[in-house]
Amino acid sequence: MRDALLAYLTEKSHQVDQCVQNHAKEITALPCLDQGAYAYVKRGGKRLRPAVLSLCAGLLGGDKNEKAALPAAAGIELFHTWTLIHDDIIDHDDLRRGGPSVHAQARQNIKSKMPHLSLDTAAEYGIDVAILAGDLLHARAISLFTKLPKYGVSPLVTTILIDLLETRYLGRLLDGEMEDTALGLLFDCSEASLSAVKEETVLQVMAGKTSALFAYCAMAGGMIGLDSAETEHPQILALADFAENCGLAFQLQDDILGIVGNVKTLGKPIGSDIREGKKSILLVHAYQNATREERRFLSSVCGNRNAADTDVEKAANILIARKGIQYTSALAKACLEKALHSADILPDNLYKDLLMSWADMMISRNF
């Protein structure tokens, strides 16, 4: 089933990319904004959210409704991508999917064209371009959703899907981003701050930043599959709960890969979470179980963007030795168990089998 899932993901990725390409010219923009908006999309990516949306549509509605979900699948990929563009600004990340982040690329481009500009001015320009490119992509994402009636989805379902995305789920995403920003800025990596960070707070951030959008994809797919505006339908709620827990497992595994992964497959520097001072579950757990000397060292390295590679490696080894990764992995598996339990009431078919394989991949992946 794993091979069948990978084949489905590849095919769905091609379909989504083609849909995005066909739609790209409907909202005109300056070249610098257009290039920034599609920079990450053109680098590939996993396309997991479009796949979840499409699989859920097929699970409840069969092949015909799985195909009808394509504009929403493409739209959700663009929606996810604009959040990444803005997220990279907030996190000061200069690398995404193996290339420069949008704001870093724009900064480099303007500095190349106008070498007399100061570094600060070029950096400000890069951030401005990235913000506007993200806004452009947001608009294009919603525009794609409006195409659903042409594919056979009722206008009422289409309207509710857009409303849910732009209110309930965007609100959750922004709340998660704000809580994450607060953790990063208001809680430094001093011993007192790291000791004060609670696991439940970190999980709330993850639920908003990552799993909420997965839950939306599943709900949207289910509604398209049934062509139903009934957001409280038991099977639709089951899909949302399933994807929510899979999303948590996905993010927990992502944090693990940020410590022990490979830069070529991950698409960002290994150890960047340590330099950023990211308050992950594995850091919180390991810190609580570290010796006093190890806590002092972690506090000196975490959040230090100029930390030496050797110090980052030593910090990572402490996280491993104090079972931060082991604990995070167990938590991811528990989330997966909850997800599978939610799926019990869903009909058995090929789409469900593929969805279960996708769920398993969330905690066994190496990308």
Image: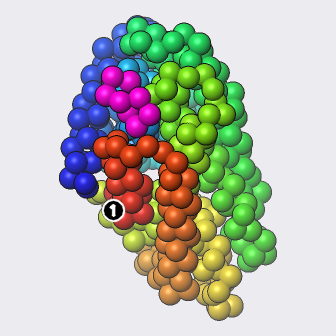
Residue 313, x across and y down, in percent: 44, 77
In this picture, is 284 found above or below 130?
below
Which residue is at 56% across, 37% downward? 236
Asked if residue 336 can be seen in this view, the reply is yes
Which residue is at 41% across, 8% downward? 150
Badge 1: how crowded within 10 Å, few (<14), some, or many (20+)? some
In this picture, is 282 found above or below 365?
below
Which residue is at 67% across, 61% downward? 202
In front here: 200 or 344? 344
In front here: 230 or 166? 230
Reading the image, the residue beneath label 1 is 366
In front here: 143 or 270? 143
Is residue 309 shown left or right of residue 205? left
Residue 199, x across and y down, in percent: 70, 68
349 drawn magenta? no
**Quarter containing the C terminus:** bottom left
Is residue 363 shown left or right of residue 233? left
Asked if residue 119 can be seen in this view, the reply is no
In front here: 56 or 329? 56
In this picture, is 341 found above or below 28?
below
Where does the magenta region start and end? 58-65
Residue 352, x across and y down, in percent: 38, 46
Circle 1: residue type:
Asn
Which residue is at 34% across, 43% downward? 349
Is residue 177 shown left or right of residue 361? right
